[in-house]
Amino acid sequence: MRTSTFVPCLLLLAASACRQQVVVYECVDASHADAADAGSTTMDSGGLDAEPMDSGPADVGPGDSGQPIDSGACDPFCFTGVDVSASVVDVGEFATLTPIVNAANGVQWTVRLDLSEVVAERPVGRPVFATGDAEVLLETTGSSAAQFRVFNVAPWFFETRFIITVHVREVGRAVEQSQTVEVVVRGNVLMSTGAEGRIYAMGSDGLPATGGGVYANGTLISQFVQAPRSMVLSRDGSLLVHDESMNLPRIKRFTLTGADVLADELEYTDGSQNSLFRFGSTTYAMAELPDGSVVFPEYAFSGPSGAPKSRLMVWDANGSFVREVWAPSPEEDWRTAATAPNGHLVVVDREGRSATRYDPSTWQPAGLILDQLSGTPYGLHGTDDALYIGGSNYLLEASWAGGGRAAVSGLPGSSFIWRGMTGYEGGRLLCARDSQTDDTNIALIEDRQFVRWFRKPGGPVTTPFSLVYLH
């Protein structure tokens, strides 16, 4: 027998009121009562009991000290747990939930699932799970197991924890026991593209996140950008996008609750009230500090003395301009910046092929991490433990202390550029490379090793610039 239950997203908030149901089975010995009490409810008259001890026979039913508890004489079955085939799944992947049941001979039981609660891991201020985010399938497979699956996700689907209540019911009696389990569904990955002039989303299954075919090719943002390059998932859950269009370069903030929801733009002037990005110079990655400040590396064509020089542009969490930090020398070509959860800020010099840590409290260099890179650096991603950097024909992991580096092994191909990077579920890494084949341009990296190509054919993105994981 196969029965399917589709849970429309509109009903998910109502489902969140459900909680685990616990049925307590009491074993009561009906065959013996204390002889002196005789079942009377009359209060004692105040006199002493005539007998030092009750003279009736001892209880011998299940549950007494001489008998094993739950011997089977009272309850026909006991629901002790749930075997979950996978606690973390991709979009479209089934998680099989198999109840662990101890049942007496001949006792039949069935299983059903309820979606009890849906919790987005991040951000705090974002709606937990909105209508249109995804479809949820709860399906029984025979009488002894059930399956859970999330599919048809919208482009803005975040990594989400689903709390599922598993009900086991004895056939023939109104007796039901329940337990809850959790399954995490990995979020989408966003890709910025200059050639197509859009930001696309793909599910953790590697396919375009079309939301049931509503969003063509997984398009998230199109009408408000012309040449999107670098992106940052802000701590408030919004998406910051650097649009390097020659006509209207801007850093724009989008609300991820639907397609093309433009919230605002970062202030468009610097300390001298000059407009920013005047020449549309390419920036590969901007960064966000722990306090929400945004750091944008730019190769400015007019430094303090009039000569070309690089600078960092800094805005506060509200998008207001704070300061600019000029490079120590005109030779430095700043195009990439990244932050780590531990607060480290890294700036990459494309000309010197080096990566330097900066102290955001003083805006002074705080140590060289990498130099003498074999080719031009582009992509950058920081974790608490390490810094990852990609460029022409290389992907490296470096220690924050500086000096140590290790190459990512097993990379297929020999001539390409590693551009955008993002952290992925489970401490892994996704890296975008310059490729004209859509199923070989995003690599999944784990423990400094190439695991597989992440993206499946789905078009039309050929050369993604920047990646963001929605978690």
Image (cartoon, helix red, strand yellow):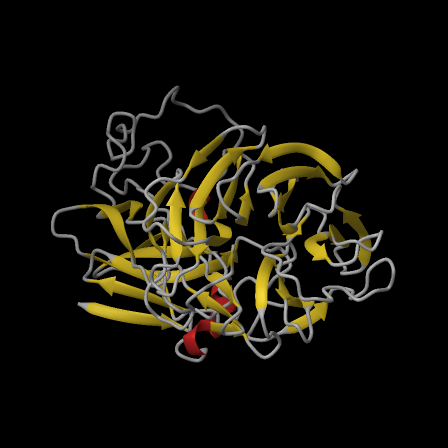
Up the image or down, 445 lies above or below 44; here it is below
User: With respect to residue 50, does 36 lie above or below?
Assistant: below
Residue 169, given in percent of the width and then of the height, sits at 27, 57
Residue sitting at x 54%, y 46%: 381
Name the quarter where the N terminus is drawn.
bottom left
69 lies left or right of 53: left
* Left or right, 132 with reference to 109: right
Instruction: Give residue 349's quadrant in the image.
Output: top right
Q: Is residue 242 visible?
A: yes
Relative image position of residue 426 (x, y in whole percent): 43, 44
Tell me the residue at 23%/56% (across/down). 145
Q: Nearer the viewer, residue 263 or 442?
A: 442
The residue lying furthest to the top in this view is 52
Q: Looking at this rendering, what residue extends furthest in the right direction?
A: 272
The picture quadrant where one finds residue 206 is bottom left
The mark tally for this picture is 0
